[in-house]
Image (cartoon, rainbow, N blue to C red):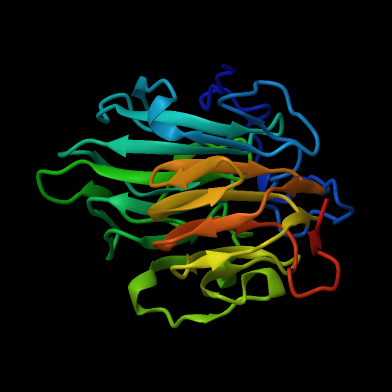
Amino acid sequence: MKNIDNSVIQKDTEDFLNVSAVKEDWGGDGRGRMNLSGRSTAISPEYIPRQYQFFDTNTVPEEKGWRIGGMPDDILFGSRRLLTWHDCGASTSRVVLPPQFEAPSGFFTADLEIFILSGAIQIGEWQLNKHCYSFIPAGVKLGDWQVIGNEAVEILWMENGFIKYKNASNNHPNARLDEFIPALDSKLQPWNQTDTVQFEVAKKKYLRRDANGGGVWLLAILPHYDSKYSMIQSYNEEAYGLVGYCDIGNYRFGKDCFGYCPSFVTVPWHRTDDGSLFFVRIDRDLSKLGTVLSYSH
């Protein structure tokens, strides 16, 4: 497995907020900055176009002694399981921070998204508990970090570029404060309809919309769902199983399972008797005609 060393940044410069966006391989201009195109995964160190990859994250080796690059040397180590990554520095990991973890205020040199899988953490004046989400644009100053209670906090940790933490008492002058989502409790968000006919018997909770029209959401697939057909997906997707299961072809996608589906992949039909809940990231507007196509073969 390839290992990204977050302590090594290509160049430590004050114009890091102006790094060019990586264009999406479906033709997008990269405005969404999710950098989901062309990723390698824990089960395929080389990117494979048009091939979906599903795996149980519990089988991915756990990297002990992991620390956010730039954090002081006296900060407690955490651990991570690296799930996907890109040469531009973007990655998605399952991170565990131990009880008594504390870190000083500062900002990141790349956008960071976090989704709490278990436990709780205080970041400045905001507390994030299970199924809370935060989007932290590069350069936005955060308060002190502290894991709450005697339970480790487990986080789906999504870096959108080479990332380093800088101790700071103020925001970077060019930080995109208008995009900052400090603490969103998904349990308080309303359920909405999905954007595609293939998932009419499902509900969506938006957590964030990106500039390309894609975004981050929770997808609840209701019991007795049967898509009947395969689907062609004209976008890049990451998905993490939270509750229940959905059979995708012969693969039972359940709790702690992860899926990476590159653009223009054909995925098998979906079925579930009991229902399921997923955390999903997609880099394209699914309401546009042709982004999801039923395919019988």
Furthest toward the top, the residue is 1
Quadrant containing the N terminus is top right
Q: Is residue 69 visible?
A: no
The image position of residue 203, as x and y in percent, is 51, 75
The image position of residue 280, as x and y in percent, is 55, 57
Up/down of 116 relative to 218, above or below? above
Identified at 63% across, 42% down, the residue is: 260
Quadrant in which residue 29 is drawn: bottom right
Query: In the image, 156: left or right of 83?
Result: left
Identified at 47% across, 80% down, the residue is: 191
Of 52 and 65, nearer the camera is 52
Query: In the image, 272: left or right of 287?
Result: left
Of 55 and 288, nearer the camera is 55
Of 34 and 126, nearer the camera is 34
Total numbered badges shown on the rendered structure = 0
The image position of residue 223, as x and y in percent, is 43, 68
The image position of residue 171, as x and y in percent, is 50, 58
Query: In the image, 35: left or right of 143?
Result: right
Q: Is residue 85 visible?
A: yes
